[in-house]
Amino acid sequence: MVKTRAAHSEPSSRSAAVVARVAASDTKGSINLRIETGIRQLIDDAAAILGKTRTEFMIESARQQAVDVLLDQRLFTLDPERYDAFMQALDKPPAPGPKLKALLRRTPAWQK
């Protein structure tokens, strides 16, 4: 069994950004690309094999790549042993070391 945990940081702002993207996706826009002839032909050939238009193929391919990139940054899977170790590390972080304590004592640059 593989347990999955999404890595979230700043959940409210990221969630709001996702909601904004979804709301914005209700309307259509356009993207103009400059592309070499050979690459355009490659895309057309691949689209034809799948029975899709160039636009359908490019949108689907770009969307899938975007999802993969975002999931790569937010989702990771662990086997049960590593998942339990990860959860324990989150529940019991180590005590601050001397370097962290020194850093926290410094005046931030924006307050100088």
Image (cartoon, rainbow, N blue to C red):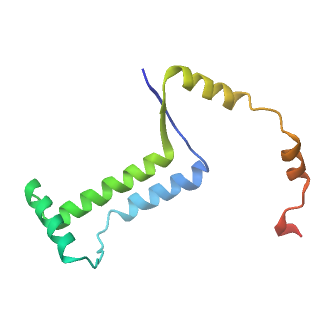
Image-based side of 73 in relation to 28, left or right: right
Q: In x, y percent, where is residue 68?
A: 38, 49
Residue at 42% x, 61% y is 21
Number of marks present in the image shown: 0
Please identify the quarter of the rendering in which residue 90 is found.
top right
Q: In x, y percent, where is residue 48?
A: 8, 60
Residue at 38% x, 56% y is 66
Q: In x, y percent, where is residue 33?
A: 29, 77
Q: Residue furthest front?
A: 38
Q: Quadrant of the N terminus?
A: top left
Image-based side of 13 in relation to 71, left or right: right
* Relative height, residue 38 to residue 85 (above, below): below
Please identify the quarter of the rendering in which residue 23 is found.
bottom left
Of residues 16 and 60, which is closer to you in this image? 60
Residue at 44% x, 46% y is 71
Q: In x, y percent, where is residue 60?
A: 25, 57
Please identify the quarter of the rendering in which residue 45 is found.
bottom left
Q: Quadrant of the C terminus?
A: bottom right
* Relative height, residue 84 to residue 6 (above, below): above
